[in-house]
């Protein structure tokens, strides 16, 4: 067990006492530093104090429901959130992803699957933070993607900085990874399956709901008119792409 993993803070928001005890025991056994609360109102306060690096979140909570907590949490934190819910209906999943969840796991679930998803989410967040803090680190084949001039879409890979319309855009690690896959392959259509496997992993190749939801997130944040996207375009029934950069000269 690495020292970095032992220091990882995970907040469990779960109203079922047996599930809380189970989650805490499993996380503790693997060296994570975890806290648990039973409702959304407690979770808001605990999140501010504990500063979790990942949240496991039930949706059906007393006092303040899971989606309401998630909305508040996303006002100030980009830490990964994995929803653990008994609801497996697609509209519920889409709603949770829309509000800001990074992943969704339906109860009952295998603890090994949950732990694998925790590791994936933490790796993605750690990589985002590491590269954000690295000075001049190499990332990909080119340091900058620009489409639409200075006030268009700009992705600075070295600094993990994204802007659109001349203003900085704050993305979650998952949103940023998806945008990077598209901009690194600018002008090329990436299929739904390719994007899901590259961003979420091989176990997610059929989760088209995830992809549609996160593309919608990005369009709301990046497009002047999300209903008529300039940057994040789709090839009907195939996948998504972004236009080629303004010029190769701007990328050197």
Image: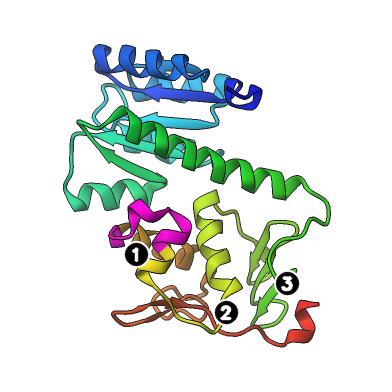
**Vertical order, 217 against 84 (above or below):** below
Left or right of 241? Residue 113 is left
Nearer the observer, 139 or 171: 139
Q: Residue at x 71, y 50 (%)?
A: 131
Q: Is residue 214 visible?
A: yes
By secondary structure, the bulk of the magenta-drawn segment is best described as helix
Residue assigned mark 3: 142
Q: Which mark is residue 212?
A: 1
Q: Position of residue 252 (x, y in %)?
A: 81, 77
Q: In the rendered image, which quarter is residue 157 located in?
A: bottom right
Label 1 sits on a secondary structure element that is helix
Label 3 – label 2 distance at C-alpha: 12 Å
Magenta-colored span: 196-208
Work out whether mark 3 precedes mark 2 in sequence or the reverse, and give the earlier one: 3
- In the rendered view of the protein, which quadrant contains the N terminus? top right
Label 3 – label 1 distance at C-alpha: 27 Å
Q: Position of residue 78 (x, y in %)?
A: 54, 42
């Amino acid at each position: 067990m690495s020292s970095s993993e032992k220091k990882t803070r995970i907040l469990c928001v779960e109203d079922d006492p047996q599930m809380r005890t189970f989650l805490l025991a499993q996380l503790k056994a693997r060296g994570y530093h975890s806290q648990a609360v039973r409702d959304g109102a407690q979770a808001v306060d605990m999140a501010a104090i504990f500063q979790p690096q990942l949240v496991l979140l039930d949706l059906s909570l007393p006092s303040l429901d899971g989606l309401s907590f998630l909305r508040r949490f996303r006002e100030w934190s980009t830490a990964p959130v994995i929803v653990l819910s008994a609801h497996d209906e697609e509209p519920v999943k889409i709603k949770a992803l829309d509000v800001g969840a990074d992943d969704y796991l339906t109860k009952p679930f295998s603890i090994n699957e949950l732990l694998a998803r925790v590791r994936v989410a933490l790796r993605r967040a750690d990589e985002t933070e590491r590269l954000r803090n690295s000075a001049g680190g190499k990332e990909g084949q080119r340091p900058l993607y620009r489409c639409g001039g200075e006030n268009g879409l700009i992705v600075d890979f070295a600094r993990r900085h994204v802007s659109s319309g001349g203003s900085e855009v704050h993305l979650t690690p998952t949103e940023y990874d998806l945008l990077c896959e598209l901009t690194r392959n600018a002008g090329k259509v990436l299929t739904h399956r390719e994007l899901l496997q590259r961003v979420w992993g091989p176990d997610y190749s059929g989760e088209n709901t995830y992809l549609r939801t996160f593309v919608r997130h990005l369009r709301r944040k990046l497009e002047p008119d999300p209903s008529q996207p300039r940057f994040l375009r789709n090839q009907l029934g195939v996948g998504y792409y972004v236009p080629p950069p303004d010029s190769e000269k701007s990328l050197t």
